[in-house]
Amino acid sequence: MQITFTTPALLFPAITLLLLAYTNRYLALANLIRKLHHEYVRGEKNHLLLKQIKILRVRINLVRQMQALGVFSFLCCVVTMYSVYEDWTVFTRFAFALSLLTLLISLIISLVEISQSTRALEWELSDMEELEKSSFFSDLWGGKEKKEP
């Protein structure tokens, strides 16, 4: 397989849009954390608020990992382009493979973060509806969250 300048350049817009989406998720989480912190300080504590705070800590760490891997993937694309320029064939393949691999891991972590987000929303819904319902993600990961009294 021959890697040219256009091969890693194809990933530039995809990675850039992905990083933009990750940044939007981060900002949404930051706003939610600020809102929940304000509720916590005012004394509006309930069992769901404490669950939300715990899961938000996990989610913010997942988003940070997603962003770091996305940036590393972008850097590997730049290194790939430079190694194509220098005609370092073996290093070019290694750098491009590393870029694809880190992008894949970033997407997998994104899927995990989405499942955490879905679980938090299910807690909210079950509290409002006073019901427990299964979801695609809870069925997929093999467990149902039990509602605490």
Image: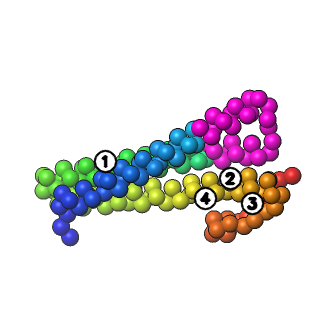
**In the image, residue 45 lies in the stretch drawn in magenta:** yes
Work out which residue is located at the far right of the displayed protein and give it.
149
Who is closer to the viewer here, 42 or 75? 42
Who is closer to the viewer here, 113 or 65? 113
Instruction: State the residue position of label 2.
Output: 120
Identity, as a three-letter code, of the amino acid under mark 4: Ser
Q: Quadrant of the N terminus?
A: bottom left
For the residues marked 4 and 3, what is the alpha-carbon distance in whole angstroms? 12 Å
The reply to whether residue 114 is in sight is yes
Label 4 near label 2: C-beta < 8 Å?
Answer: no
SS assignment at label 2: helix
Label 3 near label 2: C-beta < 8 Å?
Answer: no
- Residue at the image point whose x is 18% and y is 57% from the top: 5
**Nearer the N terminus, badge 4 or badge 3?**
4
Q: Where in the figure is residue 103, as x and y percent of width and height?
A: 39, 57
SS assignment at label 3: loop
- Residue at the image point whose x is 60% and y is 58% from the top: 115
Q: Where in the figure is residue 55, as x and y percent of width and height?
A: 66, 47
Instruction: State the residue position of label 1.
Output: 75
**Nearer the N terminus, badge 2 or badge 1?**
1
Q: Which mark is residue 115?
A: 4
Q: Residues within 10 Å of mark 2 (few under 14, many from 20)?
A: some
Specify the segment rendered in magenta.
31-57
Q: Residues within 10 Å of mark 1 (few under 14, many from 20)?
A: some
Which-is-in-front pick, marks 2 and 3?
A: 2
Instruction: State the residue position of label 3.
Output: 145
**Nearer the N terminus, badge 4 or badge 1?**
1
For the residues marked 2 and 3, what is the alpha-carbon distance in whole angstroms? 10 Å
Label 1 near label 4: C-beta < 8 Å?
Answer: no
In the image: residue 134, left or right of residue 9? right
